[in-house]
Amino acid sequence: MNIYKFVIQHSALPSIDGLGQKRGQPIGKIEKRERKIMARFDCPAYKLLAGDLHGSQPVESSGGQLVESSEWRLAGGGAPRQLRLVWLQGELRNVSADYDSAALVDTSGSVLLTGCTAAPGDPHWMEDGRYCMAVGELTCGSPPQLSVIKLAPLPEVHRQMWELEVRHARAHLLQGAAE
């Protein structure tokens, strides 16, 4: 069956949507495709530097076919990691006139951001030199490309702590890979 039904199992409220939907009744149907889209948010976004993505490759099966596109081997080697979402911070450069693409540059390299206008919010704050955070899905390309899901401006104080945050997160990521 390609359609899933979701049932409210625990609700203190008599109605979830204000339209008389009772607890225990189906609240809607979500197609398999939509469920797959929602599943990408089940994994955390990994804090990385742009340089961590340079030289990274999607994992291939023994037959040369790409495995799920969220499986990547980072340039530093080691076991492939499920990188559904990547969190980067840096300065914007080369913002396109339609605000849909830009380069994100940090101390280690740059990444091309695509689909910026699809992210929530008004993109008109985007300008060269603006410090921001970007969360998105890694796609193939040189330089690496990030299909943006969230993009937001940040104050300069975040720039000072970012590399330390990434080092701390990387230590936990590598520790998890060793277990």
Image: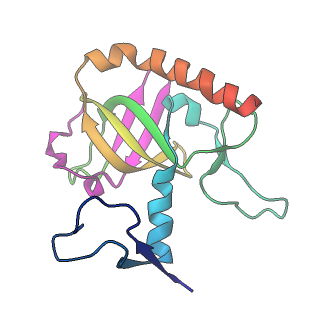
Q: The magenta stretch spans which residues?
A: 102-128
Does the magenta run of residues contain 53?
no
- Against 104, residue 144 (above or below) is below
The foreground one among 139 and 98 is 139
Left or right of 166 in this view: 130: left
Does the magenta run of residues contain 108?
yes
Q: Residue at x 48, y 47 (%)?
A: 145
Q: Residue at x 24, y 29 (%)?
A: 130
- Of the 4 image quadrants, the one containing the C terminus is top right
Q: Position of residue 146 (x, y in %)?
A: 45, 47
Left or right of 79 in this view: 127: left
The foreground one among 17 and 32 is 17
Q: Residue at x 41, y 72 (%)?
A: 7
The foreground one among 18 and 114 is 18
Q: Position of residue 49 (x, y in %)?
A: 50, 28
Location of residue 157 (image quadrant): top left
- Of the 4 image quadrants, the one containing the N terminus is bottom right
Q: Among all residues in the image, which is located at the extreme bottom?
A: 1
- Against 178, residue 79 (above or below) is below
Q: Position of residue 150 (x, y in %)?
A: 32, 46
Q: Residue at x 62, y 29 (%)?
A: 173
Location of residue 125 (image quadrant): top left
The foreground one among 85 and 146 is 85
Location of residue 64 (image quadrant): bottom right
